[in-house]
Image (cartoon, rainbow, N blue to C red):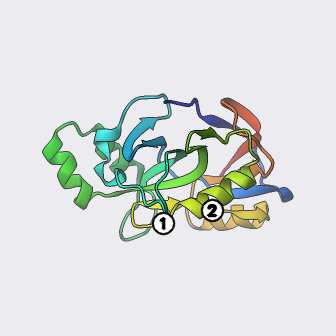
């Protein structure tokens, strides 16, 4: 099952607002993960199956067995700087030969930064507020080397934006705590690129 992703509207300047969560923008690829009866399927932003590309993402660290649809960003993190390296991720994405993909799993491992849960055990939770979905995700997913819940701060967008710029990130995302997950572009999620 592929769900059209919710997309952000661009906003030029950072802001503070207690009705918003602020997350870092990761320089990677949007990725939707579906797990049904223990079987994982990975889909790109446009619905292309990329399951084969990222074998290290086939074992989802859930605290209890569940069928889920997750939304996030896959990235390659430079082991020396900790920063996302989009060119290296592109190398992984373009690999077609199974032996190269298998070797890259160890030599160039990716991390899946998960920022939302869309389905849980057959229930569509997109109509729940973002804050509720984040709590469900936190209760369900255990972080490890390949799976990380996207960190966020509440309300303090300007300070978070400045910290993101200092760390060399793309910018930040501002998401209304009460936003429902809707397909396509939304005013409820905004992107503030670093300048």
Residue beneath the point at 30% across and 42% down: 53
* Furthest-left residue in this view: 99
* Secondary structure state at the residue bearing disc 1: loop
Q: Which circle marks residue 165 in the picture?
A: 2
The percent coordinates of residue 195 (x first, y second) are 66, 52
Q: Residues within 10 Å of mark 2 (few under 14, many from 20)?
A: some
In the image, is 195 to the left or to the right of 32?
Answer: right
Q: Earlier in the sequence, mark 1 or mark 2?
A: 1
In the image, is 55 to the left or to the right of 25?
Answer: left
Q: Residues within 10 Å of mark 1 (few under 14, many from 20)?
A: some
- Give 123 or 142, whichever is nearer the viewer: 123
The percent coordinates of residue 1 (x first, y second) are 49, 30
Q: Is residue 195 visible?
A: no
Res. 187 image quadrant: top right
Residue beneath the point at 81% across and 48% down: 178
Q: Which circle marks residue 143 in the picture?
A: 1
Q: Is residue 162 above or below residue 20?
A: below
* Secondary structure state at the residue bearing disc 2: helix
- Give 85 or 124, whichever is nearer the viewer: 124
Q: Is residue 52 above or below residue 84?
A: above
Disc 1/disc 2 C-alpha distance (Å): 25 Å
Q: Which circle marks residue 26 in the picture?
A: none
């Amino acid at each position: 099952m592929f769900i059209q992703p919710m997309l952000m509207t661009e906003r030029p300047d950072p802001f503070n607002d207690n009705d918003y969560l602020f997350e870092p923008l990761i320089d990677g690829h949007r990725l939707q993960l579906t797990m049904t009866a223990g079987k994982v399927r990975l889909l790109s932003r446009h619905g292309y199956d990329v399951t084969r590309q990222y074998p290290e993402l086939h074992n989802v660290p859930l605290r209890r067995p569940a069928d889920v649809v997750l939304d996030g960003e896959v990235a390659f993190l430079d082991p020396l700087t900790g920063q996302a390296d989009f060119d290296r991720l592109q190398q992984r994405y373009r690999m077609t030969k199974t032996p190269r993909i298998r070797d890259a799993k160890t030599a160039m491992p990716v991390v899946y930064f998960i920022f939302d849960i869309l389905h849980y055990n057959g229930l569509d939770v997109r109509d729940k507020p973002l804050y509720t979905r984040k709590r469900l995700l936190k209760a369900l997913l255990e972080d490890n080397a390949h799976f990380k819940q996207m960190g966020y701060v509440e309300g303090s967008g300007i300070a978070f934006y400045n910290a993101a710029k200092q760390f060399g990130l793309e910018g930040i995302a501002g998401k209304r705590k009460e936003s429902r997950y809707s397909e396509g572009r939304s005013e409820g999620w905004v992107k503030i690129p670093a300048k």
